[in-house]
Structure formats: C-alpha cells, structure tokens
Image (cartoon, rainbow, N blue to C red):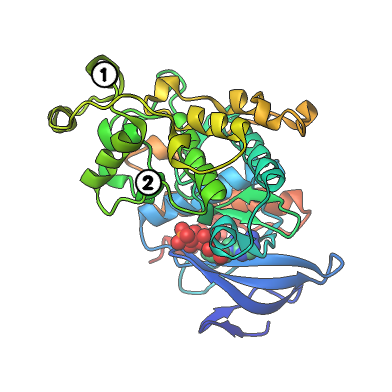
C-alpha cells in the first residue's frame, strides 16, 4: 500500500482510489478528492475519520455511518464504500467513500454568483424532499446549515454531516436530553432549543432549513446575533414576540421565562419582511418555516405541497424511508467504548456485504482490542 500524505495526514486506503488533493478538513476528519479506478474513474470524496478517543466520538461515528448507510435518497449523502485499515496496536483507521461535491451552499452564498429564483426553487425542493425522507425515518438532522449541504454544478444538493443526528422518541414526539450537548451553530438554532432546552423535535430542522432558505434569498445570515441574549432579542425583533399563552406552549425553562418577561411586547411580523426577495410564493414559504412557535411551523410534507414548488413538483420523488433504523446505543448509558467500536465494525461489514467485499473478522478485532 502506498503512503500518501495529504495535509500531513497519511491516507492508506488501498489501490482502488487514485487520490488527488485535500478538499476539506473538519473537526472529525479530513477529506480528499479521489478517482475510483474500478468505476470509470468517477470522482469520489474520501473522508479519513480522526481516531476515536472516547465514547462521544464513537457514538458520533456510529451515528454518521449508520444513518448514511441506511438512507437511500438522492439528497442525503451516500456512502459508496468504507475502508478499514487494520492496525496492530489500536483500532484501525476508517475511510468513508462518498460522491464528490465541489462546493457547499455556504461557498455558493458567499461567492459572487447570484442564484436565480428557479435555482433557489430547485435547491429548496430537493432539500425539502431530503428532509421529508429523513424525518419519515424518525431521525432529526439537528445541524442543518449551508455548510452541511453539499452541491454540484447542476445545483444538485445533499445533506451531509449526520454525526449530530438523532432518532426522536416517537412516543413523545420530542427529545428530552441535556442541553449542554447541543452545540449546533447558533445562527441556525431554533427558538425552542434556545428557550425550552428540554423538548424539541422535527421542527428544529425546518427552522434551520428556513434560515438557510433566507440566506439563499438574501445572501445574508438572517439571525446573526453574537450571543445567546442578542439572538433571542433578534428573534422577537424580526418576528414579533408571541403572547405569554403561546410562549407557555414551548418555553419550559424557568430562567428563560423570567428573561422573556423583561422583553417588551412586539406584534407578530413575517420573516420575509426582513428578507428582500421578489417572489411572493418563496416569501410565503419562508414565513411558514420561520414560525417561532414550533407547533405552528410548517412540516416537511407541507413544504412539498407549497405553491412555491408547484411548477417543478414531482410527487413520485417525494418518498419516505422504508427501512428500520435502530439506534439503541443512544440511550444506553452503560455502553463502553469497545462495545461501540464493535458496533462500528458491524456497520462497516454491512456496507462491505452490500458491495460483495471481504468482511472484517470482528471477533479477531475485538479480541485484539480487548488486550489494551
Ligand atoms: N462528499 C464530499 N465532497 C466534497 N467535499 C466534501 C465532501 N464531504 C466533505 N467535504 C469537505 O470536507 C469538509 C469536512 O467534511 P465534514 O464536514 O464531513 O467533516 P466533519 O469533520 O464532520 O466537519 P465539521 O467540522 O464541519 O463537523 C467539508 O466542509 C467539505 O468542504
């Protein structure tokens, strides 16, 4: 095996892929552009995951692989292949091979290229289809933002970075968990996450997608406040302050309640008043996505039915998830790092089985891992 260094990081992922250049570095891995020599030299992105340090890392990786491998949707980044580079003295290195996308929406928004209404419509329709599918699987992305949406020259887009996604509790239709874990980029964070800290569900993704939509329209971040307090003030400045009765429906945190009492009343206003854009249908959809009260916020399904998409809608493409996505490890507080590593190997083998590739002998790997 050749030893290729990219950004100082060795990429030992076999002979099949011809590696070209480093295209991105994230908090959890480095991504290299490559050509798949066994598949018409197709461009691929190969992400080498950083070494797993702890249970949080392992859960993130497991989630990312499990969700992406289980999904089969044009607007959700696929995993073509996975390479496990065995090490003698530690858990092996993992390389995830996906379709290559030259840009993300953040780069498009920041570039000088103006998007037409037709392009915005096409991008948003794909993102609503992707979200409808994801939500139908009982998962929430939780970190939707322009930087986590990849795009190509044809304006085809897909969600990536599922390391923060969760299954929601279908019984209660909401999450209940410790807020300290919530690290999603503040600009795209829904009001109920900021205010209640305890209960949130699919509407958080609609909010984040709404913020992304506003940014596609105006090329400016709508809620770009520098801190938590300013962010809350900005929500109410732009959208008006809901009545106490309405706030009671989704603000469960006492401190948040007291703070809200100090803010002056302000009549409700549509988000589109703050987003200059000519198309009335786009503006109406935006207003329904950026509803402060999650109970009144439009769903992904209703987004697809919105008149903004009427001229391009193809209901045959609005599919739901058909598989079974079990994420029992999320709620298992006694799970160990080695348990999680084993689950990761099982996921890798699922992908290898689908590709008719030789599988990892998990028992051997685990025996070795248990030695240190
Ligand atoms: N399929 C892809 N095609 C092209 N570039 C990609 C692809 N996947 C990731 N990248 C690039 O690599 C960067 C890092 O990838 P990614 O976001 O998946 O890593 P991460 O460690 O999870 O990042 P983050 O710190 O944003 O959570 C991205 O910002 C993007 O520029």
Mark 1 element type: loop
Say if disc 2 is inside 8 Å of ligand 1: no
**Neighbourhood count class around disc 2 (C-alpha, 10 Å): few under 14, some 14–19, many 20 upward:** many
Residue 55 visible, this orientation: yes
Is there CB contact under 8 Å for labels 1 and 2? no
Is 204 placed above or below 244 here?
A: below
Residue 89 locus on image (x, y percent): 46, 74
Res. 334 image quadrant: top left
Front one among 147 and 221: 221
Residue 83 locus on image (x, y percent): 64, 64
In the rendered image, the residue lying farthest to the right is: 40
Residue 157 locus on image (x, y percent): 67, 50
User: At 69% from the left edge and 77% from the top edge, which residue is drawn?
Assistant: 19
Residue 21 locus on image (x, y percent): 64, 79
| Nearer-N-terminus badge (1/2) | 2
User: At 63% from the left edge and 33% from the top edge, which residue is drawn?
Assistant: 133
Residue 141 visible, this orientation: no
Judging by the rendered image, the residue that carries numbered circle 1 is: 243
User: At 77% from the left edge and 31% from the top edge, which residue is drawn?
Assistant: 311
Q: What label sits on residue 223 in the rendered view? A: 2
């Amino acid at each position: 095996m050749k030893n290729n260094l990219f950004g100082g990081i060795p990429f030992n992922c076999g002979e099949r892929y011809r590696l070209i250049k480093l295209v991105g570095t994230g908090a959890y891995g480095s991504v290299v552009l490559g050509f798949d020599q066994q598949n018409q030299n197709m461009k691929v992105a190969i992400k080498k995951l950083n070494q797993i340090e702890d249970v949080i890392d392992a859960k993130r990786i497991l989630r990312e692989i499990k969700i992406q491998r289980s999904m089969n949707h044009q607007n959700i980044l696929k995993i073509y292949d996975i390479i496990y580079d065995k090490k003698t003295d530690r858990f092996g290195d993992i390389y995830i091979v996906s379709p290559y996308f030259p840009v993300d929406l953040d780069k498009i928004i920041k570039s000088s290229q103006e998007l037409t209404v037709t392009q915005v419509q096409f991008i948003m329709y794909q993102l609503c289809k992707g979200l409808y599918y994801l939500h139908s699987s009982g998962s929430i992305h939780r970190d939707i933002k322009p930087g986590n949406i990849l795009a190509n020259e044809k304006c085809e887009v897909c969600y990536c970075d599922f390391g923060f996604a969760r299954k929601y509790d279908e019984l209660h239709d909401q999450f209940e968990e410790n807020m300290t874990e919530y690290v999603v980029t503040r600009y795209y964070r829904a009001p109920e996450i900021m205010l209640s800290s305890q209960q949130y569900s699919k509407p958080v993704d609609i909010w984040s997608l709404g913020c992304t939509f506003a940014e596609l329209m105006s090329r400016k971040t709508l809620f770009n406040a520098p801190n938590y307090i300013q962010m809350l003030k900005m929500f109410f400045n732009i959208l008006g302050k809901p009545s106490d009765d309405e706030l009671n429906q989704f603000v469960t945190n006492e401190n948040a309640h007291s703070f809200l009492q100090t803010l002056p009343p302000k009549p409700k206003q549509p988000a589109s008043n703050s987003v200059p854009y000519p198309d009335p249908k786009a503006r109406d959809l935006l207003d329904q996505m950026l509803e402060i009260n999650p109970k009144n916020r439009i769903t992904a399904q209703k987004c697809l039915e919105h008149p903004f998409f009427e001229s391009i809608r193809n209901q045959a493409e609005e599919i739901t998830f058909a598989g079974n996505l079990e994420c029992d490890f999320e709620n298992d507080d006694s799970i160990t790092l080695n348990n999680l590593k084993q689950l990761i190997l099982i996921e890798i083998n699922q992908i290898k089985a689908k590709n008719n590739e030789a599988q990892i002998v998990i028992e051997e790997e685990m025996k070795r891992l248990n030695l240190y």
